[in-house]
Image (cartoon, rainbow, N blue to C red):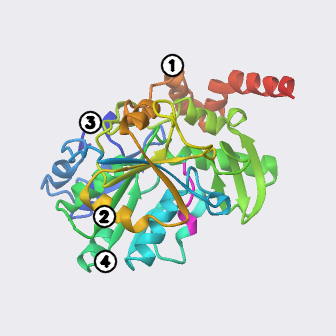
Amino acid sequence: MMNICDYHLCTGCATCMNVCPHKAISMQSDKHGELHPVVDMANCVGCGLCINRCPVNQDTERLEPRKCLAVWEKSLNDRKYSASGGVAAALYRTVVSTYKGIGYGVEWGDELKAHFVRANEYHLDALKGSKYVQAIVGNIYGQVKMDLYEKRTVLFIGLPCQIAGLKNYLHKEYANLITCDLLCHGVPPQDYLVKEIKSLIPSKHLKNITNCRFRGNDKYNYWLTLWNGDKLLYGKKAVHSYYLTGFLTSITLRESCYHCKYSDRKRVADITIGDFLGLGELQSHNGTPPQNISVVTLNSDKGVKFWDKVKSSSLQQEERAIDEAVSGGGSFRNCATRNPKREQFLYNYEKYGWKKAIRKSLWKSILKAKIQSVFNH
């Protein structure tokens, strides 16, 4: 078996699969549910392109933020289904309406698997909201390259490791490409969420699930909720949800997330967005902002120029010191810390599968949270 990079540092960005001219690489789940490249040695010619373009092996340029902003959509209705201040939706609207371009982002597909898609103006709402799971990249980098060659303006929003993967795949700068990376705590493998939802379907008698949400500017902020259109089918607060608690307490993240080299103030994308944690701690804030505020850092000339087109009367924005965002936002400083229970979880996952493994790891925490909620009422 051929290792393209250090196995434990592999982010599953799929650059190797996309760049292979002989289609000799596929992304497959390993014994812990993580996607890793598998090389078909019968088709591999040993050209080394996968190794040379891999972001683990070849660093991507890092950019020091030039400007830091606190931003949110003024209309609660417009940001209702957004994880923070609704900035990603504004970015997508701008590239489609102002530039007549194309947006790339993540939506829910079959079996509620998160995957990258190419979106036009009729498809943008599906990209809203945080997907606390590692999205399937597939062959999306090739579609981006085709749009760039055809002189379309492209906005690509993804995790820093995925932005690095795209850039290493393209291997050159494109004036018509705007990249936006997300402040990332880390991501669980896709298999975990799929198996959690499948375990809920018979026990909760769920049918016709079309959407999954974890965050929102409504009462379901930090809940695991499943929907059929606008109809709520299932909902659990984060502290009562095995899946969300596993994510938030860093038991279930991909192994590379504990070694992430992108958790730094220097960014790989033109624009960075995420939660503005610690807003007001180093610098007073005028007024009372809503509960979920986005931090936006503009990291390049392209990012600054694009943001000038994004600004509109619907957005409230205030310039802040980058040190304020860095001090409050752990993802600007450090990668996720491995939970002490992780090794036992992985052992149980191999032995028993997802449902039993996560419940053996977290049943005491979930029970304690449920008891506390009873006394709090």
As shown in the figure, which amino acid type bears the numbered disc 1?
Pro
Residue indicated by mark 4:
152
Name the element at disc 3. Answer: loop
Which is closer to the viewer, label 4 or label 3?
4
C-alpha gap between disc 2 and disc 3: 37 Å
Q: Residue at x 71, y 54 (%)?
A: 226
C-alpha gap between disc 1 and disc 4: 47 Å
Height in image: 153 above or below 334?
below
Residue indicated by mark 1:
340
Circles 1 and 4, Cβ within 8 Å, touching? The answer is no
Residue 293 on image: x %, y % = 55, 47
Q: Looking at the image, which residue sits at the far top?
A: 340
The first of marks 4 and 2 along the sequence is: 4
Q: Quadrant of the C terminus?
A: top right
Name the element at disc 2. Answer: helix
Front-lying residue, 282 or 348: 282
Which is closer to the viewer, label 2 or label 3?
2
Which is closer to the viewer, label 1 or label 4?
4
As shown in the figure, which amino acid type bears the numbered disc 4?
Arg
User: Callout 2: few (<14), some (14-19), or many (20+) C-alpha neighbours within 10 Å?
Assistant: few
As shown in the figure, which amino acid type bears the numbered disc 3?
Asp
C-alpha gap between disc 2 and disc 1: 45 Å
User: Callout 4: few (<14), some (14-19), or many (20+) C-alpha neighbours within 10 Å?
Assistant: some
Residue indicated by mark 2:
305
As shown in the figure, which amino acid type bears the numbered disc 2?
Lys
Residue indicated by mark 3:
6
Q: Residue at x 62, y 38 (%)?
A: 244
C-alpha gap between disc 4 and disc 3: 36 Å
Residue 357 on image: x %, y % = 61, 30
Front-lying residue, 145 or 152: 152
Please give the range of residues in magenta: 125-131
